Image: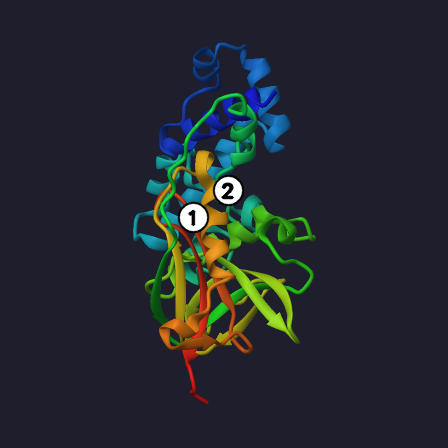
Amino acid sequence: MYEWNEMVQRMIDWIDGDLTDAPTLLRMSEQLGYSPYYCTRQFHALTGMTVRDYIRLRRISRAALELRDTDDRILDIAVKYGFSSQEAFSRAFVKAFKLTPGAYRTARSPIPLAIRAEVFSPYHYLMKEREKMREVHLQAAEIKLEFIPDHKFIGIWDPDSVNYGGFWNNGHNCDEVSGTLESMSHHTLEGQLGQTAGWFYVNGRKGYLYGIPVPADYSGEIPEGMECRDIPASEYLVFFHPPFDYLQDNGAVMRTVEEVAWNYDPIQMGYVWDEEEKQDYQRHFPEGYGYAVLRPVKKAGSE
């Protein structure tokens, strides 16, 4: 039932594996055993774009990061990512981001980069494997203390959402928001992962947030539709599971961590929750970091 989700994800993985020399549609179709026409039709149905357009947008987004992070000549970057000339690269860049490569390199302002598409999820994997018995050995959630200094958080606070799925289904464009935040990744607060979700509280009511933590002295541009808030320094209790297989174990890992995080009494460590003016954080990077829920605390008895 979900065969094509998996096959299109394989195409995406092949493309993103080397954007400077992405495989042709013909080569990918031969590996999958279907005609190029059928492959591109399924790719478009699941991603909303053609293979050619996906490659072009991913290449120009990767090129934008090299403009931001390197001193390489614009022409060299253009050729590296398959553009016939600097002029062709500039036309494509302006069409995608409404400014020239040179202007972007100078300003390094937030732009909506095209992020890697995901069309094969843990849900699809579960449906595919539903008739197989698999014993999963998950370790218990670790609990540790982490200090995060004063910082700012740039993003969206949605009082009508309480989780990741609800947030993106409540009028927020995942590709646009995530792509824009990716263009700001060089501002990420030291020691943090970058794009971060979490929860906040207003009059006891829980909402969901998504954005990026940046240093307290950040004074750059705030993307349209987002806001910047000051977050005071705090200690956090971190409920953590190390790296895991996203497709096979994502749901089980998240349940394991969150069951402990939302039912833990910090008094046994000499702390109490401190969430009235601070926000919880949710880190989700399965293969590289793992999964964690961070809740702010203060010493018991402190004012």
Earlier sequence position, callout 2 versus callout 1:
1
Disc 2 marks which amino acid?
Gly
Disc 1 marks which amino acid?
Ala
Q: Which mark is residue 64?
A: 1
Give the side of residue 45 with respect to residue 14, left or right.
right
Give 109 or 242, whichever is nearer the viewer: 242
Q: 282 above or below 145?
A: above
Residue 208 in percent (x, y) is at 60, 61
Give the side of residue 187 with respect to residue 99, left or right.
left
User: Can residue 218 be seen from the camera position used here?
Assistant: no
Give 202 or 49, whichever is nearer the viewer: 202
Quadrant including the N terminus: top right
Taking the spot 42% from the left edge, 79% from the top edge, the residue there is 298
> Outermost residue, front direction?
268
Residue 189 in percent (x, y) is at 38, 66
Q: 10 above or below 258?
A: above
Q: 187 above or below 139?
A: below
User: Can residue 158 be seen from the camera position used here?
Assistant: yes
Give the side of residue 38 with respect to residue 108, left or right.
right
Q: How many tags in the picture?
A: 2
Q: Residues within 10 Å of mark 1 (few under 14, many from 20)?
A: many
Q: 147 above or below 263?
A: below
Q: Residues within 10 Å of mark 2 (few under 14, many from 20)?
A: few
Q: Which mark is residue 251?
A: 2
**Element under disc 1:** helix
In space, the residues marked 2 and 1 are separated at their CA atoms by: 34 Å
